Amino acid sequence: MDIPLRDFLGIPYNELEKLNRDAKQRRIDSFGKTETTIQKYYLDYLKKEEGIKAVTVAFTDIEGRFHMLDYNKDFILESHDNLTFDGSSVKGFTQVNESDLKLKLDWNSFYWLPSDIFGPGKVIVFAEIYTRDNILHPSDFRSRLKSYLLRLYEKEKYLVMGANEIEGILVENVDAEVNFDEKEGFKLASSGGYYHSLPMDRLRVFIDATAEAHRALGFENEKDHPEVAPSQFELNYKHSRVDIAADQIQLYKLVARQVAEKQGMTATFLPKPIVGINGSGMHTNISIEKEGKNVFYKKNGDIHLSQLGYDFIDRILGKASDISLILNPSVNAYRRLDPHYEAPNQIKSSAVDRAAMIRIPLANEKSSRIEVRSVAPDANPYMLYYTLLRVGLEGPKQKINKSVKTRTKTLPDDINDAIKAFKRSSFMEKLLGEDTKNKYIELKQTTADRCPKKLGKKVKRSEVIYHHEITNQYLWNEF
């Protein structure tokens, strides 16, 4: 008689969804409060649940690359307050002579994982990065965003809400990015596009499986569908406080990549993997609540937007070129900012014009928001939200002489121009800090220098294989 050798936790999707939605509500309710109670809750759970074998600890580097380490459950129970890792192996953190960094678990970000995607017996917790002197690391924008949100709440009682419309493209073969052939290009997995994909088309099967996993993670899905370009997808879900929304971006892409790999394909979040069709964006919606009221809403205002909302928009537009490198952080991202494919490259706001950098959707009090459209799906989500909030709430208001008609300004058309604008911005230095700003410039310039100065009409191998999200350690070490 065969005896099963492994009996680790595997939770059905409907039960996973309830667990993760409850965890999300627990996180919402505990905002601004001490984390001792929530930490005890999950440590007690891990002690009791024999089916958990490992805790996946996740963090994000300065460019937005997602890193994960699996710790044995018993080790986490004993040493959760003394986790370290080699920061010299992660770009943007430390040099070899100061490699030890600390991981502090953010127990509020606890998720139960679908066992068919991550393996049975695993949960995931996001972590904050500290230096060996117990100071929050300036390159860890997750912790910087969280600290800023707490300051806003303490000072203004603001709760910042966000939602992201994350597009990607499904292409043939596993590891299609690492093995990219410039002559052949990517091969689309499906010819279907907006509303055209058949029920059991490969794209639909991928979308269904990914959406099921997102629901199980507590995303509270709203709409899952093919997008305009052939083989393009977008899965929409409920807005959340922006620290939760940023975590969900990382999980969204991770799940999509893993589902695609299981199906023998690649889900790519390159902003423009194929010339001649629409690129992929990550429209970022932001609203601010205070004491239960949406303060971006004004009942009798022009398109129901309050003065705070207009000021927020004006400040972002005033620094649009300065922040372009954060919103569009790769060589490939500037291919997407092509006005022939509904690309939002114009530095203006509009209620209807989809070429505008910022759209003001028609909305009621509940849904009033601004939509920053010129964001690529490869942006660091934490740096993205941190920058938009700091600029939108603290940046200088732009002065416009509306009686003088001028040509609409546009965003930089390649990464080198974006780097120049970012480099000369004293405001970005004030916002990020000199060292962090210089680290980011160095990483982006290194990538830019390995690619042709002009984009041209064909996607180059260098802009794909040296892209910061492409998971090939050998190529990264070539830097």
Image (tube, grey):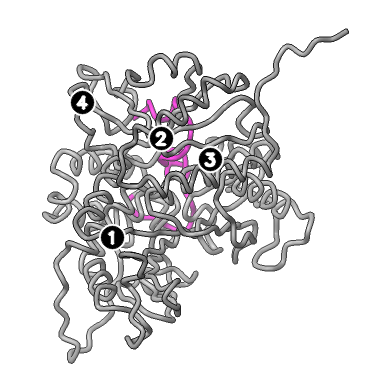
Cα distance between the residues tagged 2 and 3:
26 Å
Residue flagged by tag 1: what amino acid is it? Tyr
User: Residue 452 location in percent, x, y?
Assistant: 36, 48
Cα distance between the residues tagged 2 and 4:
21 Å
**Other residues around mark 4 within 10 Å, as few (<14) / some (14–19) / many (≥20):** few
Closer-to-camera residue (109/460): 109
User: Residue 53 location in percent, x, y?
Assistant: 57, 19
Cα distance between the residues tagged 3 and 1:
30 Å
Instruction: Please identify, in this view, whether the residue under mark 2 or under mark 1 is nearer the observer.
Output: 2
Q: Is residue 475 above or below residue 358?
A: above
**Label 2, on which residue?**
38
- Magenta range: 453-479
Residue 134 is marked as: 4
Asked if residue 158 lies in the magenta stretch, the reply is no
Residue flagged by tag 2: what amino acid is it? Ile
User: Residue 180 location in percent, x, y?
Assistant: 55, 40
Judging from the image, what secondary structure is the residue with disc 4 in? loop
Residue ID at (29%, 78%): 306
Instruction: Please identify, in this view, whether the residue under mark 4 or under mark 1 is nearer the observer.
Output: 1
Q: Is residue 400 visible?
A: yes
**Label 3, on which residue?**
254
Asked if residue 470 lies in the magenta stretch, the reply is yes
